Image (tube, rainbow, N blue to C red):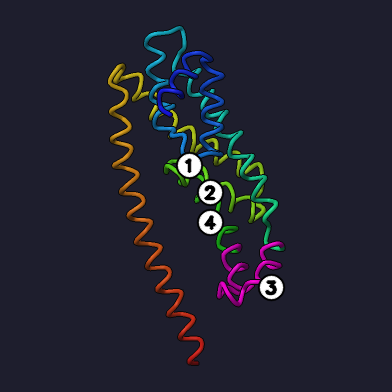
Amino acid sequence: MENWITDFMEQYGYFGIFLMIALENIFPPIPSEVVLPFGGFMTTNSDMNVIGVILAATAGSVVGAVILFWIGLQLDVERLEKIIDKWGHVLRVKKKDVHRADAWFDKYGIWTVFFCRMIPLLRSLISIPAGMSNMNFLKFVLFTTFGTLIWNIALVMLGASLGEAWPKINDYVGVYSSVIYAVLGVAAVVFIIWFIRRRQTKRTQ
C-alpha cells in the first residue's frame, strides 16, 4: 500500500496529498505517517513547497473529518435510545448511560477533538462521537483544523528535514502510537472497573 500511496502522490502532487489525507480520515489503514513525511520529502525534489503541502493535507483532513461527523449525526442519541430499547438488556446499557456520556462529550468534547487529532487512528474516529453529540459544527471544524494543523506541520517538516530518510519517521510514530494506545488501554480498563463497581454499589444500596 505504501508504494501505491507514494506513487499516487508523485503523480498528482497537492491534489494527491489532499485526497490521500481525506481518505486516511475515512479509512484509517491509509497512514498519515506515510503521506505527510513523504509530502515533506517531495518538497526537496520538486516544485512543491512545505506550506502548500501542509495546506493541502489540512484541507483533506477537514473534509474527511466532516464526512465522519455527518455519519455521526445519523447515529444521534435518539437512535441510540431506540437501539437500547431493543438490545439494552443484552448490552447491559441504560438510556441514562448514553445521556451521561453525551453530557460528558458536550462538556469536554471540543478539547477531546483537538487532542485526538494528534493521535493516530483516534484522529479519524473521534469525528463520529462528535457528530453523535451534535457538537457545534463551526467549533468542530475549528478545533479539528487547529489539531490537524499541528500534526501536519510536525510530520511534513520532519519529512522535509530528513529528505530521503523520511521513512524513519514511520518507526518513531509507531513507538508514539504504541505508547498512546497502551495508556488508553489502561485508562479503559480502569474506567470499566470503576463503572462496574459503581453499578454494583448502587444495587446493594
Which image quadrant is residue 165 in? top left
Q: Which residue is mark 2?
A: 126
| C-alpha separation, residue under disc 4 versus residue under disc 2 | 13 Å
Which image quadrant is residue 32 in? top left
Q: Which residue is mark 3?
A: 85
Q: Are marks 1 and 4 in contact (CB under 8 Å)?
A: no
Question: Earlier along the polypeptide chain: callout 2 or callout 1?
Answer: 1
Measured as percent of width and height from the top left, residue 203 is found at 51, 88
Measured as percent of width and height from the top left, residue 79 is found at 70, 62
Q: Which residue is mark 1?
A: 117
Measured as percent of width and height from the top left, residue 186 is found at 34, 61
Quadrant into which the N terminus falls? top left
| C-alpha separation, residue under disc 2 versus residue under disc 1 | 8 Å
Q: Which residues are magenta?
A: 79-102
| C-alpha separation, residue under disc 1 versus residue under disc 4 | 15 Å
Instruction: Look at discs 4 and 2 and give the one toward the viewer.
Output: 2
Q: Nearer the viewer, residue 57 or 113?
A: 57
Instruction: Look at discs 1 and 4 and give the one toward the viewer.
Output: 1
Q: Is residue 62 magenta?
A: no
Residue flagged by tag 1: what amino acid is it? Arg
Residue flagged by tag 3: what amino acid is it? Asp
Q: Are marks 3 and 2 in contact (CB under 8 Å)?
A: no
Q: Is residue 126 above or below residue 62?
A: below
Where disc 3 sits, the SS reads helix
**Going 39% across and 22% down the picture, which residue do you hit?**
38
Measured as percent of width and height from the top left, residue 181 is found at 36, 51
Please tell me whether the stretch drawn in magenta is mainly helix, strand or loop: helix
Q: Which residue is mark 4?
A: 108
Q: Is residue 96 magenta?
A: yes
